[in-house]
Image (cartoon, rainbow, N blue to C red):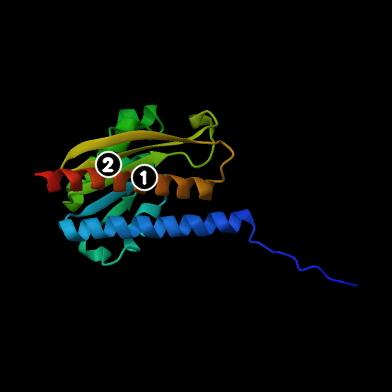
């Protein structure tokens, strides 16, 4: 009997995870290098990402030189008390709106006295308040001004852990693009 050699390749999910990790490392490296070279700092205010942004910044080389810290605030009480979110708006929108993300980003920048900040709030699980949908709002602040504020929608069947990772990667990608814009501005001056 002649045995044919089998070509065994990695399953697609493993390849996807490897690509994801490589891309994330590249993102970390780029963001970290920019912040180190510019001498600028960053902070985060999160709910839906459960501290994944804070974790991501902490993984960057020499993070303590530019990452000042963050707040993970899940409840209305903490968002109102720690991040000065408007209580009426928080009640009306279940703490999930574009304005709440902006307020979170602005307040965390003021608390930590950072050049940059990111605020994010949303849903990683479909619930009645989200009408069964998954989405987040995020805002990026630079020197006290909101420079980007967006909504990101995900498929309602996305697993909660994956949703948090997708949100984190997307927001970090947007942050990188904003850093690139400001770097180009500074070079041309």
Badge 2: how crowded within 10 Å, few (<14), some, or many (20+)?
A: many
Label 1 and label 2: CA atoms lie apart by: 9 Å
Which residue does the image show at 36% across and 31% down from the upper left? 97
Q: Quadrant of residue 56?
A: bottom left
Residue 173 visible to the viewer: yes
Q: Is residue 22 left or right of residue 120?
A: right
Q: Is residue 67 left or right of residue 90?
A: left
Residue ID for mark 2: 140
Q: Position of residue 46 (x, y in %)?
A: 35, 47
- Quadrant for the N terminus in the image: bottom right
Residue contact at pointers 1 and 2, CB within 8 angstroms? yes
Describe residue 136's horizontal placement relative to residue 10 as left or right.
Answer: left
The residue singled out by tag 1 in the image is 171
Relative to 2, is 89 above or below?
above
Residue 86, position as x, y percentages in the image: 28, 32
Q: Position of residue 106 (x, y in %)?
A: 22, 41
Q: Position of residue 73 (x, y in %)?
A: 35, 47
Total number of numbered discs in the rendering:
2
Q: Quadrant of residue 55?
A: bottom left
């Amino acid at each position: 009997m002649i045995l044919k050699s089998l070509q065994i390749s990695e399953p697609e999910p493993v390849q996807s995870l490897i690509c994801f990790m490589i891309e994330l490392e590249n993102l970390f490296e780029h963001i970290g290098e920019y912040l180190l070279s510019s001498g600028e700092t960053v902070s985060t205010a999160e709910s839906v990402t459960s501290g994944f942004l804070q974790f991501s910044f902490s993984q960057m080389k020499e993070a303590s030189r530019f990452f000042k810290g963050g707040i993970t605030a899940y409840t209305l009480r903490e968002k109102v008390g720690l991040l000065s979110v408007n209580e009426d708006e928080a009640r009306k929108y279940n703490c999930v709106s574009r304005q709440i993300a902006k307020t979170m980003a602005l307040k965390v920048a003021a608390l930590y006295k950072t050049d940059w900040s990111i605020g994010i709030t949303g849903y990683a699980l479909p619930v009645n308040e989200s009408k069964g949908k998954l989405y987040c709002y995020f805002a990026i602040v630079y020197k006290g001004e909101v420079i980007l504020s967006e909504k990101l929608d995900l498929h309602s069947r996305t697993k909660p852990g994956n949703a948090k990772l997708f949100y984190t990667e997307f927001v970090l990608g947007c942050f990188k693009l904003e850093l690139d814009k400001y770097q180009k501005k500074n070079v041309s001056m």
